[in-house]
Image (tube, helix red, strand yellow):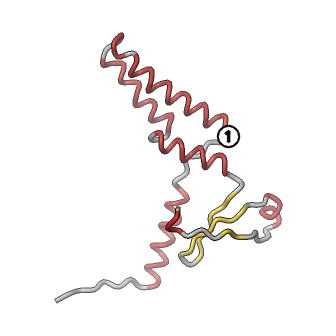
Amino acid sequence: MTTVNTVKPAQGAKAQGAAQSAAREMNFASRSVPRHLARGAIGVGLIVGSIALVPVVGPAALLAAPLALVAFRGCPTCWMVGLVQTVSRGRLERQCVDGVCTLITAHPGAKAANEPTAGINIPAASR
């Protein structure tokens, strides 16, 4: 006997809304590009310093490495994602309607006047 679980439309909408809110929470951007680059320099300096100081200080120097994760807000890849988010902030927006996500060009004047902007369709699978 096989059991098939079906998703009701209301449940699907709730799941889609939860996925969209989770995507909005994944923000690694900083307030400015120089601030983000400074965080990266601090993170790289802490990693390099902790490894370079092992012969001098001993394994205790590796305790500086977790501080680099704080500077990177996770890992170096998270820092890179944040750099892209920081650079593109205010230039691109993602809109998800009926399960189809698109990137649109954000126009500062259009946002202020609540005017629609032209959309650039990018399949969700390519992101």
| Residue at the (49%, 78%) spot, across then down | 13
Please identify the residue farthest to the top as the structure is shown: 56
Residue 113 appears at what percent x and percent y? Answer: 83, 66
Residue 5 appears at what percent x and percent y? Answer: 30, 83
Q: Give above or below for 119 relative to 64.
A: below
Foreground: 45 or 114?
A: 45
Please identify the residue farthest to the front as the structure is shown: 126
Quadrant occupied by the N terminus: bottom left
Please identify the residue farthest to the left as the structure is shown: 1
Residue 57 appears at what percent x and percent y? Answer: 35, 12
Within 10 Å of the Cα at label 1, are there few (<14), some (14-19), or many (20+) other Cα atoms? few
| Residue at the (61%, 42%) spot, across then down | 30
SS type, badge 1: loop
Q: Give above or below for 102 relative to 43.
A: below
- Residue 75, located in which quarter of the rendered image? top left
Report the residue marked by disc 1. Answer: 32
Q: How many marks?
A: 1
| Residue at the (73%, 61%) spot, across then down | 106
